[in-house]
Amino acid sequence: MQGSATPTSKTMIVDRKTISIMKACELVGVSRRTIYNWIASGKVEYVRTAGGSVRIFVDTLWRDPSGTSKAAIWPETARKEA
């Protein structure tokens, strides 16, 4: 009964939407360089396609990785929303 003593883990598959670097720039209102800086620093998550393109996970553009307000991280977006 080795297997019954350990809890079973459930795998959850989540379908996450991705967008291109240029679409992310338009959506958030920043330059391509800024998006690449965010990728390098871990502020946004990305995936590289089989063809070598970089796709950004949309949900990571709006998350708050440091606990500060979104306006402090993405001031351009905060101004557009106001």
Image: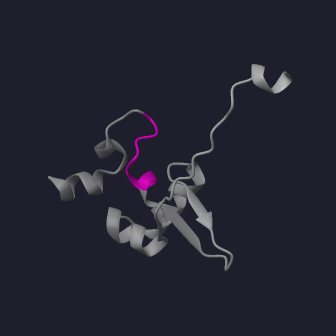
- Up the image or down, 45 lies above or below 55; here it is above
- Up the image or down, 81 lies above or below 53; here it is above
- Up the image or down, 9 lies above or below 63; here it is above
Residue shown at 74% from the left, 23% from the top: 6
Q: Is residue 62 magenta?
A: yes
The quadrant where residue 80 appears: bottom left
The quadrant where residue 69 appears: top left
Q: Is residue 1 magenta?
A: no
| The residue stretch that appears in magenta | 59-66
Q: Which residue, as the protein is rendered here, is positioned at the far bottom?
A: 51
Q: Position of residue 1 (x, y in %)?
A: 84, 21
Residue shown at 34% from the left, 51% from the top: 74
Total label count?
0
Q: Which residue, as the protein is rendered here, is positioned at the far front?
A: 1
- Quick one: 11 or 48, which is closer to the camera? 11
Q: Position of residue 31 (x, y in %)?
A: 41, 68
Q: Position of residue 50 (x, y in %)?
A: 69, 76
- Quick one: 9 or 25, which is closer to the camera? 9
The quadrant where residue 40 appears: bottom right
- Quick one: 60 or 1, which is closer to the camera? 1
Compared across the picture, whether 82 is left or right of 20 comes to: left
Residue shown at 50% from the left, 53% from the top: 44
Q: How is the image coloured?
A: one colour
Q: Which residue, as the protein is rendered here, is positioned at the far right?
A: 2
